[in-house]
Image (tube, rainbow, N blue to C red):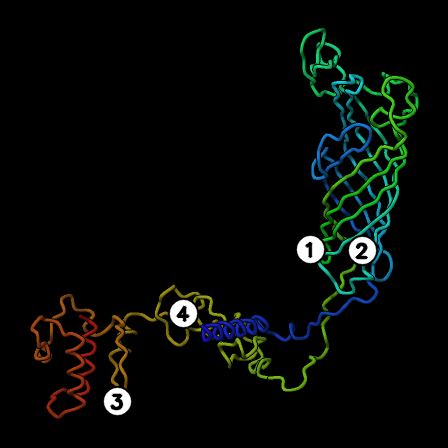
Amino acid sequence: MRLIKKITLLLILIFSIQLLFAQGGYEELLMREVEVENPVYMPVIGLGAGFINYYGELKNDTKNILQGNPSYRFNVYMPLGKKHYWKANLNVLFGTMSGYERSYSDTSKNLNFMAEITSFGINFEYNFGHLFKSERMLRPFLSIGAEYFSISSNNTDINNSLGAYQYFPDGTIRVNDQLSKRDYNYETPIEKINRFGNDSYSQGVPALVADAGIDFKISNRVILKIATSLHYTFYDQIDDVSSSNTKGRIGDSKRDMFSMSYASINIDLFSDPKTKMIEELFMDITGDFDYNLIADNDHDDVLDLNDDCFDTPAGVEVDSVGCPIDLDRDGVADYIDKDPSSITGAIVNEHGVQMTGDEILAGLLQSYTAVGRSETYMIPIGLGWSKYSQMSNVEIPEKFKKLDIDNDNYISFDELLKAINRFFDSDESDFKPDDIYELNDFFFAQ
């Protein structure tokens, strides 16, 4: 297992080095990443969504801050100071809040409401950078600020299509003495009916806001913010129950509040990057640097480390591995190819020109000077051309029939090798060098 791990590590190292110098010219080695001095920071835009929960004399419709009425948040913040421990944040919030109460013993305590709000606020955020000196992916924050929110509508559900709800001590709801249920359609404006003798309804309300949460750094330009904000309003009439009521349901003097739990994505689209790539005039190499890694002896802009053709002539266009371009793939580079559009699979000469059948046959039939066995080797590949290629029914020539030991009218490869061995190793062979060449041609023509 240790050997496998070492081999794997070695392969990864080799692959990494090749990636570093792949397609290598010198340009990559002259590039260096540097930190931007005095970068210009621009406002960061954030979009988020979450839930609003109401806190007042009535009950909240949900039991925890991870549920509630849907809400949406848009913010723009600007980092403050050199180290950005503080941020100034502008917020816009859209959403609804709702509440209810249900009582059997006191039938006057069966109220409900739903209010639609839009708020505009500013706050200052601190991210504890003085405590966390190093760069962290997760960083807590606190913020405090103020806002002004408007109530675009604030309605209550007091009747359905049949008439007004009547609540009874036995827990039933009746309309015109008929058992009924609430339709949860908030159809009646609270301010319009003024059922509790209070004329202090307001459409615009100031509030104090405190946020707490965590910033999750996804990249240098993208941050995910998860937080909860508490909004303390200077208003006690959102739920239509306050100490200023003069009849019916009279509440306490505490102000109404609400919270918003949200997640938002903040994207820095306009600020300068923290680092940039610069091109050096000279390569910074010191110590025992291996200059073979950047060698390019044929000056084709492909480093020798990745060059498959080391001696490309000057000025010749090369491919990604440093070899001259050969568009027709005939084995002859375009810069010396006299026929750069050869048919695929054609046999060509040294100039890239397709050879005729006669030219191929003449080349195969030319005489060769015999050499010693120690200076030769056999490659059993049939080129498909010999003086027997033009025969319609190939028969074993008379002088080779004695080599067909198994009398199957076919000279096998083993029978061919025995004849060649006998020619080189003993004086018993009556074949001449030309016979051996002819035997080889015949074997491949079968």
Q: Residue at x 78, y 21 (%)?
A: 111
Q: Where is residue 207 in the image (x, y as percent from the top left)?
A: 88, 38
Q: Which of marks 4 and 1 is nearer the N terminus?
A: 1
Marks 4/1 in contact by CB < 8 Å: the verdict is: no
Measure the alpha-carbon separation of dots 2 and 4. 67 Å
Q: Are dots 2 and 1 in contact, CB under 8 Å?
A: no
Residue 227, relative to residue 298: is it above or below? above
Q: What residue type is labelled 2?
A: Asn
CA–CA distance in space, label 2 to label 1: 16 Å
- Mark 2 or mark 4, which is nearer to you? 2
The residue where tag 3 is placed is 369
Mark 2 and mark 4 in contact? Answer it, CB < 8 Å: no
Give 358 or 418, whichever is nearer the viewer: 418
Q: Name the residue under label 4.
A: 330
Of labels 2 and 1, earlier in sequence is 2
Q: Which amino acid does label 3 sit on?
A: Thr
CB under 8 Å between discs 3 and 1: no
Q: Closer to the observer: label 2 or label 1? A: 2
Distance CA(mark 3)–CA(mark 2): 89 Å
Q: Vertical placement of 75 versus 332: above or below? A: above
